[in-house]
């Protein structure tokens, strides 16, 4: 008995295969709950949430593995370095939004990808929210690290 685990997503010529991983219910629910695909969010709120997560996790490597780790300035260095990376990524988003205007296509995992990423205005709003959220996430991570360091030591 032959069992096909990989099926095409409606058209075998598209190249969007429905595998057991990307077509399972739990993976679809997880991906559709990400801020990029969540229903009912504005483009600015999408960028804000994505930026907060990125700013928060970019802080750690700069503060703990940077050249001035172990000093009192490592916390400030982590915030400034993470903010600099967020600014560079925001510029990249703005450049991408100025040249891209293709509407996102539905796939096996995301049946309705939303319209925010199909217009220049949507990408611009996502980019501005990303900048504010990213710098804010880096600052929050720095404040939490400072509070923990003050409490422990």
Image (cartoon, rainbow, N blue to C red):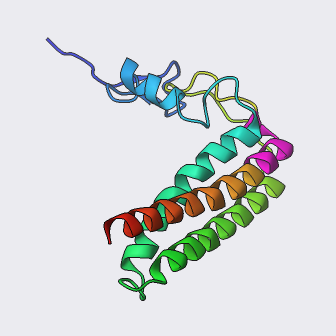
- Position of 135 compared to 78: left or right? right
Q: The C terminus is located in which quarter?
A: bottom left
- Position of 4 compared to 86: left or right? left
> Vertically, is 90 above or below 72?
above
> Vertically, is 97 above or below 115?
below
Q: In which quarter of the image is residue 55?
A: bottom right
> Vertically, is 70 above or below 144?
below
Picture coordinates of residue 85 (x, y %)? 60, 70
Q: In which quarter of the image is residue 145?
A: bottom left
**Which residue lies at the image location 40% right of the left edge and 27% below the top edge?**
27
**Which residue lies at the image location 56% right of the left edge and 62% below the top edge?**
138
Picture coordinates of residue 128 (x, y %)? 77, 53
- Is the magenta region chiefly helix, strand or loop? helix
* Residue 1 makes an appearance in the image: yes
Magenta extent: 116-126
Residue 55 magenta-highlighted = no
Residue with the most extreme left position: 1
**Which residue lies at the image location 64% right of the left edge and 29% below the top edge?**
113
Picture coordinates of residue 100 (x, y %)? 78, 51
**Which residue lies at the image location 59% right of the left edge and 36% below the top edge?**
35
């Amino acid at each position: 008995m032959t069992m096909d685990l990989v099926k095409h997503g409606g058209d075998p010529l598209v190249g969007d295969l429905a595998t057991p991983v990307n077509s399972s219910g739990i993976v679809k629910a997880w991906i559709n709950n990400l801020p990029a695909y969540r229903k009912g969010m504005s483009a600015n709120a999408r960028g804000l949430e994505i930026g907060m997560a990125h700013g928060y996790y970019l802080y750690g490597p700069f503060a703990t593995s940077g050249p001035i780790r172990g000093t009192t300035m490592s916390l400030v260095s982590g915030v400034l370095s993470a903010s600099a990376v967020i600014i560079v990524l925001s510029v990249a988003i703005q450049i991408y939004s100025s040249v891209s205007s293709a509407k996102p296509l539905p796939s096996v995992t995301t049946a309705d990808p939303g319209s925010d990423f199909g217009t220049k205005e949507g990408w611009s709003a996502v980019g501005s929210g990303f900048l504010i959220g990213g710098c804010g996430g880096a600052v929050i991570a720095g404040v939490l690290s400072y509070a923990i360091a003050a409490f422990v030591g």
